[in-house]
Image: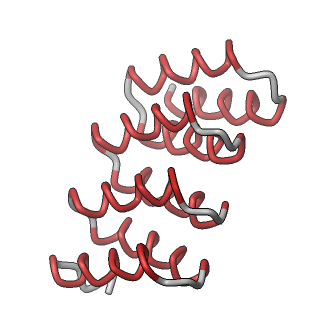
Amino acid sequence: LGQIGGDRANDAVIEVLQNDKDSQVRMEATKSLGQIGGDKAVTACVKAMRDDKHLMVRRSAAEALSQLGGDRARAACIDILRTHADCNTRKDAAVALGRIGGEQAINACIEALQKENDGMMRMEVTRSLGQIG
């Protein structure tokens, strides 16, 4: 479905992401949304990154957002970097920001470096800043 694209495919994949009990299936759904694109895909991936109970689904959603790019994906990743309770999800947001880029991403990463105490988190943020350039 991710390779076919279109609104119908998008809606079907979002339905799977929101309702399937299997985390592997939800993870694959985020990958498909990264290929399909569109506003609905961004919205669904942001929700998954914020709310899914499985780290790998959240991580896959972050990867999809980095593929989708754009202002909405960047803003969501910045918010998640600043506020999410899970350090791994914040790291994934930093990685996504490194791929999305932009001045706002740079500022958010610098802010995270000043705020975060976790060494692995600081390393990922530093890598993201290097990737942005």
Is residue 43 depicted above or below 57 in this figure?
above
Residue depicted at x 44% and y 50%: 66
- Specify whether 49 is left or right of 67: right
Residue 58 horizontal/vertical position (percent): 57, 59
Q: How many labels does the image show?
A: 0
The structure's colour scheme is secondary structure
- Specify whether 84 is left or right of 100: right
Outermost residue, right direction?
A: 119
Is residue 114 depicted above or below 35 in this figure?
above
Residue 129 horizontal/vertical position (percent): 58, 26
Depth check: give the residue in front, 80 or 119.
80
Q: In which quarter of the image is the N terminus?
A: bottom left
Q: In which quarter of the image is residue 123?
A: top right
Outermost residue, left direction?
A: 7
Residue depicted at x 23% and y 79%: 5
Residue depicted at x 51% and y 77%: 26
- Specify whether 18 is left or right of 1: right
Q: In which quarter of the image is residue 110?
A: top right
Residue 109 horizontal/vertical position (percent): 56, 23
- Specify whether 33 is left or right of 119: left
Is residue 96 depicted above or below 26 in this figure?
above
Residue 127 horizontal/vertical position (percent): 66, 33
Depth check: give the residue in front, 120 or 53.
53
Depth check: give the residue in front, 110 or 13.
13
Residue depicted at x 24% and y 78%: 11
Is residue 116 depicted above or below 26 in this figure?
above
